[in-house]
Image (cartoon, rainbow, N blue to C red):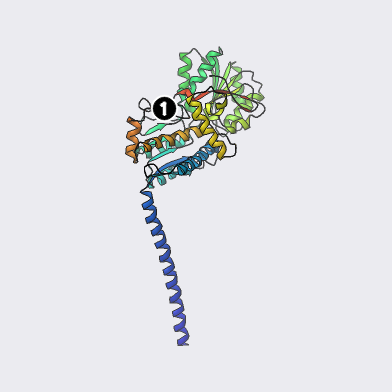
Amino acid sequence: MREWHKKKWILILSLVCMLVVSGCGIDQSSSSAKDGSDAKNGDEIKIGVIVAETGPASTLGSSQANTVKLLQKQLDEAGPIDGKKIKIIKHDYETDDTKAVVAMDKLLSEDVAAVVGATQSSTSMAIMPKAIENKIPLMTVAPIESDSEYVYSMSHSTTVISTPIVEYLKKNNISKVGWINASDGFGVTGLPAFEKLAKENNIEIVAHEEFDATATDMTIQLTKIRDAKPEAVIVWSRTPAAGVVARNFKSLDFDIPMIQSTAAANQGFLDQVKDDNENVMVIGSKLSVVDQLEDSKQKEELLAFRDAYTDEFSGGEPDLFAAHLLDGVNVVIEAIKAGNTTSEDIQNYLQKDLGEYLGITGTFHFAETQASPEADGISVLSIENNTWKYNGQ
């Protein structure tokens, strides 16, 4: 019996030793991988990206996520820049601002040189304080307002978005409009900017209505607007609510133009208004109508991105939101190509040396303003045969 117990304990000790050795092996492997990773990371420059790849805002963020994949593939194929590999670290915040803040913390812990994001205005505002506190350049891809030197807007300001709307109204002798917007972070930003431009151009807002961004019917609000007899209706909301407004607009038999903001310039909106979209327009990217543009340097840039995207994603079309993301990452890459590898160096380059930069979204002048690109990358787009049509504005 004693001999049996002895053998039993020897067996147990042997198993424990095996587990310890095995455990140590894992730890050593992890440590070795970490050491190797750290060594590798010395030759890496990381760019963080926060987008809504899933959730309600994925109608905007999915093309941004695709653009990250395309960019990383292109960067890998091109090889290191001055011996430094560029790694894009993407986080899907699932249309949840809290998760976006968590993602921002993770990116900061990984020593990213800059951050691009987020898909929504409210989310961008949520992550912005952390970027400013840590002095990390933040390339925002949703309309926000900030006077921080560390925040760069890749998307157009509400004033810039409103400019082609006002130009369209003036060209068509429209002086009375109805306004309807979502009551969320993006929806409420449009009216103040538009009001100022409208007043300067003798355009009267005869009705103003709001709706919850999650609402599934806006008939009551649109009926009130119709009673005010406007000559056009302006909508400030992202999809899917933007599409709901458009469908209600058609069901009420409005016979006047509806113009939606850039947040409706995506395939999701086209799908929502399919086969019933007469008089429905959006402020969209020239990227969406690139084949209809006259030859120019801008057209060359747009075509290059469009063709690379469609080849990579089986005919899928990039949109304005993909353009915002692309410009955000590419501006950082421009800084890296110029020999800037740290957040501080990239920040100094963007502030002092980049100058005029022609992006897919439009032309940027960070030395003059970080609030918006010019309006040269957007236009009033109508819909014909369920695709975008360029109106020459």
> Eyeballing the image, is 24 above or below 370?
below
Nearer to me, 71 or 264? 71
Total marks drawn? 1
Q: Where is mark 1, residue-wise?
A: 364
Compared across the picture, whether 62 is left or right of 250 comes to left
- Residue 310: image quadrant is top right
- Give the x, y percent position of residue 15: 46, 74
> In this picture, is 105 found above or below 231?
below
Q: Position of residue 148 (x, y in %)?
A: 35, 32
Using a 10 Å C-alpha cutoff, classify the residue at mark 1 as few (fewer than 14 neighbours), some (14 to 19) or many (20 or more): many
Q: Nearer the viewer, residue 120 or 25?
A: 25
Give the residue type that dot 1 points to.
Phe
Q: Secondary structure at mark 1?
A: strand
Q: Residue at x 47, y 19 (%)?
A: 195
Residue shown at 49% from the left, 21% from the top: 162
Percent across and percent down for residue 167 are 51, 16
Q: Quadrant of residue 234?
A: top right
